[in-house]
Structure formats: C-alpha cells, structure tokens
Amino acid sequence: MNKALKIGTVGVIAGALDLIPLVMVKAPMLNMIAIVCFWIVTAIFISETKLVKNSLLNGLIVAVLIMLPVVMTVYTVNPKDFLPMLSMAVILGPIAGLALEKL
C-alpha cells in the first residue's frame, strides 16, 4: 500500500472514531472538520517520528504531545472538555501507531 494512502487512511479512520462523541453531542461542523484534520496530521507525525521503538508507545507519546497545546487552548474556553479530548488521544494514539506499523 502506498505510504501516503496508508497514513491518510489511518488518519481518517482515527478521526472518524473521534467524531462519534462529537456527533452525539451535536458539536459544530467546524469542530468535526478540525478533529479529522488533527488526526490526519497526527498520523503523519506518528508515521515519520520514532521517539521509541514500540509503535504503541510511539503513537501514544506523539498523539498526546500534539494534543496538549490544543487541549490547553480549549481548556481556557471550556474546562470540561479537557479530559475527553486528552483521553481520545490516549486511546487513539496507540491504535494509530500500531495500525501504521502493521499496514
């Protein structure tokens, strides 16, 4: 599979999984587009960055590091979104890391 296609597929799937809670609470469309873009970019970084050899840990670390500034910015506006946003990075980051290694 082409590397760009693999990265894009993993990013879109992770973004779609992250959309589930947003759709349930009827979040604004711009938020939904932003989260899909976030996961596509995060998949690129996970694919190209090897902080540790373990793909699960690499995905976790990269996703959390990229999500931290976003979460801190959102926290100033809506503090209750801090934990759900960070937890999605903790859950989907390792999954994306593993998927990128296996594909």
Image (cartoon, rainbow, N blue to C red):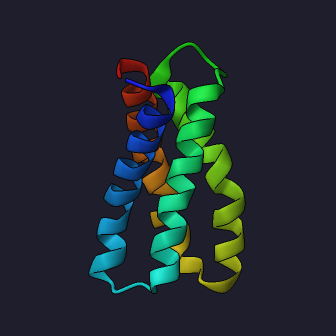
Q: Is residue 94 above or below residue 51?
A: below
Q: Number of marks in the image?
A: 0
| Left-right relation of 58 to 12 | right
Percent of width and height locating residue 24: 27, 79
Percent of width and height locating residue 53: 56, 13
For the residue pair 86 and 11, the one nearer the viewer reads as 11
Q: In this view, does 40 lie above or below 7?
A: below
Dividing the image into 4 quarters, which one contains the C terminus? Answer: top left
Percent of width and height locating residue 70: 66, 64
Say whether residue 82 is visible: yes
Dividing the image into 4 quarters, which one contains the N terminus? Answer: top left
The residue lying furthest to the top in this view is 53
- Name the residue at 29% across, 67% down: 20
Say whether residue 61 is visible: no
For the residue pair 46 and 37, the one nearer the viewer reads as 37
- Name the residue at 45% across, 65% down: 84
- Name the residue at 56% across, 57% down: 38
Question: Which of the 4 image quarters holds residue 68?
Answer: bottom right
- Name the residue at 40% across, 45% down: 91
Q: In this view, does 33 lie above or below 2?
A: below
Question: Which of the 4 image quarters holds residue 98?
Answer: top left
For the residue pair 69 and 102, the one nearer the viewer reads as 102
